[in-house]
Amino acid sequence: MCGIVGFTSLKTPAVGPLISGLRRLEYRGYDSAGVALESSDGIQIYKQTGKVAELDALLRQSLSPEEGGRATIGIAHTRWATHGQPTKANAHPHVADGGRLALVHNGIIENYAALRAGLEKHGVTFQSQTDTEVLAHLIAQFDKSADFLSAVTQALKQVEGTYGIAVISMRHPGEMIVARKGSPLVIGICDGQTVVASDVSAIIAHTRQVIYLKDGDVARVTPESVNIFSLDAMPVSRDIQEIDFDATAIEKGGYEHFMLKEIHEQPDALKNTIRGRLDRSEGTAILSGFNLSPRELAAVRRLVIVGCGTSLHAGMVGKYLFESLADVPVTPEQAAEFRYSNPLIGPDDWVIALSQSGETADTLAAVRESVRKGALVSALCNVVGSTIAREAGRGVYLHAGPEISVASTKAFTAQVTALVMTALKLGRTRRLSREEGIRLVEEIERLPELVASVIERSDAIAAIAEKYAATNDMFFIGRGILYPTALEGALKMKEIAYIHAEGYQAAELKHGPIALLSGKTPVIALLADIPGKEKTIGNVQECKARKAPVVAIVTEGDDDACAHADDVIAVPRTSQHLSPIVSVVALQLFAYHVARLRGCEIDQPRNLAKSVTVE
Ligand code: AGP
């Protein structure tokens, strides 16, 4: 969940590219940061708690231009603490061998305590409470006698857990060793320099030619060469791939926050998700990435959708889509629960993994468990070349473009849109008629304009947010397909505005949570004009009876629904299958404006990180 960068060049000083790389990866973790710069004088370490900007300030104070100019190889890290508080001592890089070796790490060394005890018996003293420092000392033990690569592989063979690492050593000047197991690592191939990073956003400024390392890969990297090996030091070849977006895609583009930019990008993102995937004449979807024949689709007995956080909420919306459009039973599963439940799945089950980043550790493990149990496994991911996408082997990319803000927005609407198209495709192998299919295709094609019209109401939503920005507790309620949408609305409010927000199935309130309602607990009710609305209006009246102020997301022109709310956010009319998409955009904007008014760190909320690569 941290971000690591490595840079080695024939002539370009490393400090600049390392700092700009860290800034790109800051959404992966931002409680402390550090760099190690190697020059003929040795390895200089600079670490700081807080954001990359604080590290940059430290470097500007303490690094003379000569020193900065001399080091053309270096490694860097931005941290999301797992072991040890966010302190300078626990910040990476960690050193060993009297400062001759430095290492940065993303992941968790699970057997670090045992390894540490063994090293302490050999007189090694530790400067930090981290699991990572153990690995630095372990490599140093072997580095005294072996070549750099085998020193690293021998050490890694003793490690249990996950890692993405970059190591430099004065015993092997000019060489960098990188390795991955469970945590992502990408190598950027350029002319006379090589860049290594946790994801492509830190590489795109240098090159679009990249190599995605696989689990068990170890690479020796110099400015002019990249050689990849297995942990047994056997040569391994990996394809060079092209990054499919350019650097502007990861700029704010004039918006105050990436989250606001990504909310506004949704109409275009949905056009990309839909493009070339609908067959209007047959009223179905194409989605060749699933690589499943109509016969295989028709043979699917049950669907299991796995994911975490926002992706899990999209999966829960998927349940309503597949069961109503394709008559197949669906079980949405929280990935961590699923992977450790010894799940009852088999060849007749289709497991679809949802992950924006394609790197979430629990979802990856759920994919591996499903493959192990012989289920049909596919993935819906946004990041091209991500581990989940590669390991699932078949699936659909969302093409929503890079999502930088920790709070996921356009990935959710793209995930639900892709799930509607998948349910349409599966439904057409069963009871869904061509006419019904064509109607749904026409609706899906209108989605970008419908979403654009919700975004146009941002100022009106901001005015309503003004009234509720000082609130500390909120309830989001919905029924049927709008229940997981309510969960998603509550998650956004928790993540970026730090408001204790709960999402509930509207009927569930009176079985307990209603006890918490008062004039201080606004209720955000999803009242789109779809089946179940009347019942939800009944629940809204129960809330009003407890003096709770109500903000309702209604279908424009539905005066009946408006009559029950203190404040109303109107969204365009759609079928129930697409109602989560237009309703959630209103909830995203509501949460965004509340957080903005509360002065919250919207793009990098406290304690969070964009992709959760540890359990
Ligand atoms: C959502 O805003 C959060 N960032 C988080 O819940 C996220 O959805 C979850 O970590 C899953 O991430 P993924 O889609 O990249 O697997």
Image (tube, helix red, strand yellow):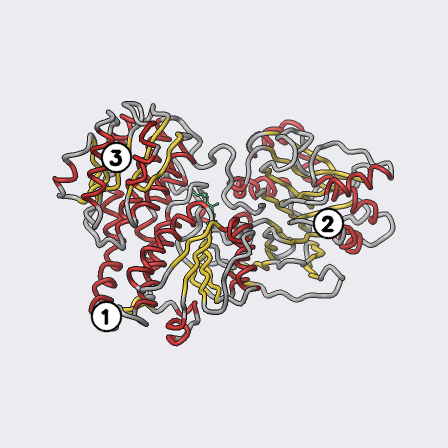
Residue 486: % across, % down: 33, 42
Label 1: element kind: loop
- Locate residue 342 relative to residue 123 in the image: left or right: left
Disc nearest the viewer among 2 and 3? 2
Residue beneath label 3, please? Answer: 461
Q: Is residue 388 above or below residue 512?
A: below
Q: Is residue 474 above or below residue 507?
A: above
Q: In which quadrant of the rendered image does the C terminus lie?
A: top right
- Locate residue 115 relative to residue 250 in the image: left or right: right
Looking at the rendered structure, the number of numbered marks drawn on it comes to 3
Q: Quick check: marks 1 and 2 in contact, CB under 8 Å?
A: no
Disc nearest the viewer among 1 and 2? 1
Q: In which quadrant of the rendered image does the N terminus lie?
A: top right
Amino acid tagged 2: Val
Spot the residue most to the front: 511
Sequence-wise, the earlier of marks 2 and 3 is 2
Label 2: element kind: loop
Query: What is the number of the mark on residue 232?
Result: none
Residue visible at 42% across and 41% down?
407
Residue beneath label 2, please? Answer: 159
Sequence-wise, the earlier of marks 1 and 2 is 2
Amino acid tagged 1: Ser
249 or 177: nearer the eye? 177
